Image (spheres, grey):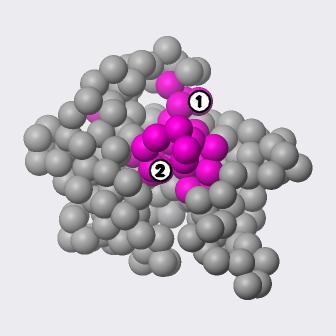
C-alpha cells in the first residue's frame, strides 16, 4: 500500500491558492482514478482506491498547513504504515511555476508544512514532490503570496504542473522513487 499526502489548507477561501497545489494534485489524481474523499479521520479527509494495481490512500490534512505533521503522525500511528510508502506533495517557492522537483530527503527549506512533518516523524528522509510556485517580487510578503491565487496567465502552466505531478505519482507506485526522480526531474 502507498499513501500520498497532499498539503494545503482546508476551506473554499484557500482552494485556488498557491499553498494548495498539493490538494489540487490529489484532487486530479482522485478524478483520474475514481477515488472519492469520503472518510474523515486522522485529522484528514481520505480517499482510498487502486491506482495502477496498487492500493493507494490519498490524504488531505485538515489541520491547516503549519500543523500537517499532526495528521501524518495520526495516520502513521493508527494504521502502522511505513514512511517509506509515503509521498508528500506540496508547493515550493524555489521551483518555477509549472515545474516539479522530486526529492527523498532534505530540510524543510522554510516550508512550515514540511517542518511540521519532520517534527512529528523525527526524520527528514521521506519522498516528496515539490510543485513550483516561484518566488514573489521583492517586497511582496511571502505569506500573502502563498495564500494568493495563481494569476490567469499562469493557468496553463499550473494545469500542466498538476498533470505532470499526477503522472509522476502514478509512475512512482510501481517504480522506485529513484527511478521516478530520474524520469521526472529531467
Which residue of the protein is positioned furthest toward the bottom in this rendering? 139
Which quadrant of the figure has residue 102? bottom right
Horizontal and vertical percent position of residue 107: 42, 77
Number of labelled discs? 2
The residue most toward the right is: 153
Residue 135 lies in the magenta stretch? no
Q: Which label is found at residue 28?
A: 1
| Residue that extends furthest to the front in the rendered view of this protein | 13
Q: Residue 137: x and y, percent?
A: 78, 77
Circle 2 residues within 10 Å: few <14, some 14–19, many ≥20: many
Q: Is 9 in the magenta?
A: yes
Q: Is residue 96 visible?
A: yes
Q: Quadrant of residue 4?
A: top left
For mark 1, give the secondary structure: helix
User: Distance from label 2 to label 1 (Cα)?
Assistant: 14 Å
Which residue bears the numbered disc 2? 8
Q: Which residues are magenta?
A: 1-30
Split into 4 quadrants, where in the image is the C terminus?
bottom right
Relative to 31, is 99 above or below?
below
Residue at x 50%, y 63% (from the top left corner): 103
Front of the two marks 2 and 1: 2
Residue 144 versus residue 171: which sits nearer the camera?
Answer: 144
Tag 2 near tag 1, CB within 8 Å: no
Residue 135 appears left or right of 75: right
| Position of 21 relative to 58 (above/below) | below
Q: Nearer the viewer, residue 35 or 82?
A: 35
Where is residue 136? Give x, y as percent.
Answer: 73, 73
In this picture, residue 1 sits left or right of residue 132: left
Residue 95 visible in the current orientation: no
Left or right position of 154 against 71: right
Q: Identify the residue at horizontal 39%, vertical 34% (top origin).
A: 58
Please name the residue shown 75% across and 58% down the image: 97
Amino acid at each position: 500500500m502507498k499513501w500520498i499526502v497532499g498539503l494545503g489548507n482546508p476551506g473554499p477561501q484557500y482552494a485556488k491558492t498557491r499553498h494548495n497545489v498539493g490538494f489540487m494534485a490529489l484532487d486530479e489524481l482522485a478524478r483520474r482514478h475514481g477515488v472519492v474523499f469520503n472518510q474523515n479521520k486522522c485529522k484528514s479527509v481520505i480517499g482510498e482506491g487502486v491506482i495502477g494495481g496498487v492500493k493507494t490512500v490519498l490524504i488531505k490534512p485538515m489541520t491547516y498547513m503549519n500543523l500537517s505533521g499532526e495528521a501524518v503522525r495520526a495516520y502513521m500511528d493508527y494504521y502502522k504504515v511505513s514512511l517509506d510508502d509515503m509521498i508528500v506533495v506540496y508547493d515550493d517557492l524555489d521551483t518555477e511555476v509549472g515545474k516539479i522537483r522530486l526529492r527523498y530527503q532534505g530540510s524543510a527549506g522554510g516550508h512550515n508544512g514540511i517542518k511540521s512533518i519532520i517534527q512529528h516523524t523525527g526524520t527528514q528522509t521521506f519522498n516528496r514532490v515539490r510543485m513550483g510556485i516561484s518566488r514573489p517580487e521583492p517586497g511582496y510578503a511571502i505569506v500573502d503570496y502563498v495564500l494568493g491565487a495563481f494569476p490567469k496567465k499562469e493557468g496553463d502552466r499550473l494545469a500542466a504542473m498538476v498533470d505532470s505531478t499526477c503522472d509522476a505519482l502514478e509512475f512512482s507506485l510501481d517504480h522506485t522513487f529513484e527511478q521516478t526522480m530520474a524520469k521526472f526531474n529531467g
